Amino acid sequence: MEFLSYLIIGVSLGSVYAIIALGYTMVYGIAKMLNFAHGDVIMVGGYISLLSMTSLGLPWWAGVLLAILVCTVLGVVIEGLAYKPLRASPSLAVLITAIGVSYFLQNAAQLLWGASPMSYTPIVSGSLPVGGLSISYISLVTIVMCVVIMTALTLFTEKTRMGKAMRACSEDKGAAQLMGINVNRTISLTFAIGSALAAIAGVLLCSFNTSLMPTTGSMPGIKAFTAAVFGGIGSIPGALLGGVLLGIIESLAKAYISTQLANSIVFAVLIVTLLVRPAGLLGKYVPEKV
Amino acid sequence: MEHLLKVENINVYYGAIHAIKDVSFHVDAGEVVTLIGANGAGKSTTLQTISGLLRSRSGGIEFNGESIGRLPPHRIVERGLAQVPEGRRIFLQMSVQENLEMGAFTRRGGVSEEELERVFEQFPRLKERRRQIAGTLSGGEQQMLAIGRALMSRPQLLMLDEPSMGLAPILVEQIFEIIGKLHRSGTTILLVEQNAQMALSVADRAYVMETGRIGLSGTGRELAESDLVKKAYLGG
Ligand SMILES: Nc1ncnc2c1ncn2[C@@H]1O[C@H](COP(=O)(O)OP(=O)(O)O)[C@@H](O)[C@H]1O
Ligand SMILES: [Mg+2]
């Protein structure tokens, strides 16, 4: 019984990681870069939703929509100003820029909203008794959101013209351009989607933690990045699998081994997995035909 | 008559390397024109510049009377100029049909079954394999997919960059048969090849490229019979 409740906590935590990991994976897939600032966009989403409820007095759903809107624009602006000029630069330059953007966002948040934690009212509260267990509504909402997002994104990339164009760009930008695909616009769209997801993840994460500060996004960001690599970076199902497994491992490690060691255990599992499967669990190698 | 494609005095650089030097040529509607030359002569660089993937520092490129030298690649495709790049560059992780759909990306309405049928008629092998992942096709099938994909945009000018590269002789024959068929059906083609003999046999006119410049030019037959070309490219 106890095990089951830790498992459910793990799955819902993992669902948040999965939603964040999706942003990493989609951006990596298309721009071949690690957007280190992704975690901080989550934090911005948290603040926007919180402040629109507390300062603007908006209902929670309007706060969530506003957070999604602001983060989408923020993601596109970050890409356009910071990353796009570096399209042809070495990947190390892009990585360092991304770290810079991450610190910029954290410091801007500190300047705007202060360094001390604010308390965050979860968008839903209470829990559902099931047998001897009680499952919090926020866990259920998170898991459902994750399933909905995964399904929508999979349908988008598999079935729609723009989704297919996105896959084409992630495979070969030059060839995609020769098809008449506007690669810059496709990359912007990817950042927009990833950042919108980050806003949703921000709301869910803050609802779990019931608090928020400028560095809130950074650790979950790194863990979600780990999840994306663990599942196979560039792969959408990989992000889901990696995120959920990571959440479960973390939750069980906290419950049965040690709270302090939980993060170390998570990263140790990643390292062992990558030693055995360098492309991650669902990462694929496509042999090139000559 | 106005040329369909007019390339005038283009100069293309890779950093400090001056890869294309004052290159000029033209293609008229309905022609098959070939650009032959040894490895590294600058043929692919020329095609990439026409497609907008690289920029010329001077000179100009006109297509249908409109200057396209400053347009981004996707705008150039929209104007009816398609390229089958060197090494095929099909989307290996996408299905055959999805590759064809990407070829029709500029035609916003989506892809009709008739549209696909039109390409499948030319390449029946692709029809059998339409749901297959492109990475699992053989080299010859991949080349056919690359050509079929470019045709999906209904180009006014089709540029092919070494379509015979890496293929067995029998497949090379097939590819050139296809080029001949496209020509007879009215498609205008700019063909880049190292296989000069085959290229000259299908071409109306030809240009010979050497270290970034165009040296000789003439009709396909003239060049096939020219001593210089025979010596340099036809092993005679
Ligand atoms: N990306 C590149 N960077 C630097 N030099 C290049 C690049 N691509 C081609 N070159 C050089 O430009 C010249 C022309 O190359 P290319 O157009 O590929 O020739 P071809 O297609 O005729 O074999 C060659 O000397 C080649 O080494
Ligand atoms: Mg070449």
Image (cartoon, helix red, strand yellow):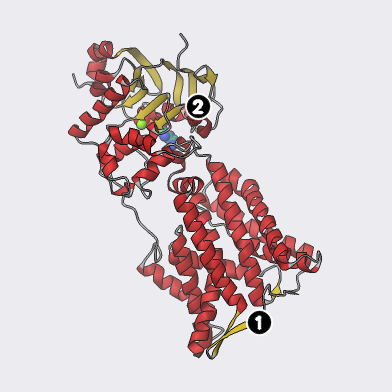
Where is residue B195 shown, x and y percent of the image?
Answer: 26, 26
Amino acid type for the residue under numbered disc 1 = Gly
For the residues marked 1 and 2, what is the alpha-carbon distance in whole angstroms?
A: 59 Å
Question: Element at badge 1?
Answer: loop
Corner quadrant of residue B116: top left
Residue A88 percent coordinates (x, y): 53, 43
User: At numbered mark 2, what does the secondary structure look like: helix, strand or loop?
Assistant: loop
Q: Using the rendered image, report if marks 1 and 2 lie on a common chain.
A: no
In the image: residue A102, left or right of residue B119: right
Quick check: is the Cβ at mark 1 less than 8 Å away from ligand 1? no
Write down the residue under mark 2.
B79
Residue B129 at x, y = what percent?
Answer: 28, 45
Most foreground residue, A56 or A195: A56
Chain letter belonging to callout 2: B
Of the numbered discs in the image, which one, if any, rests on residue B110?
Answer: none
- Within 10 Å of disc 1 (Cα), the crowding (few <14, some 14-19, many 20+) is few
Q: Which residue is mark 1?
A: A126
Q: Amino acid at mark 2?
A: Arg
Q: Is residue B229 visible?
A: yes
Q: Residue at x 46, y 60 (%)?
A: A236
Foreground: B70 or A88? B70
In percent of width and height, residue B59 lies at 53, 19
* Quadrant in which residue A39 is drawn: bottom right
In the picture provided, is A41 more to the left or to the right than B171?
Answer: right
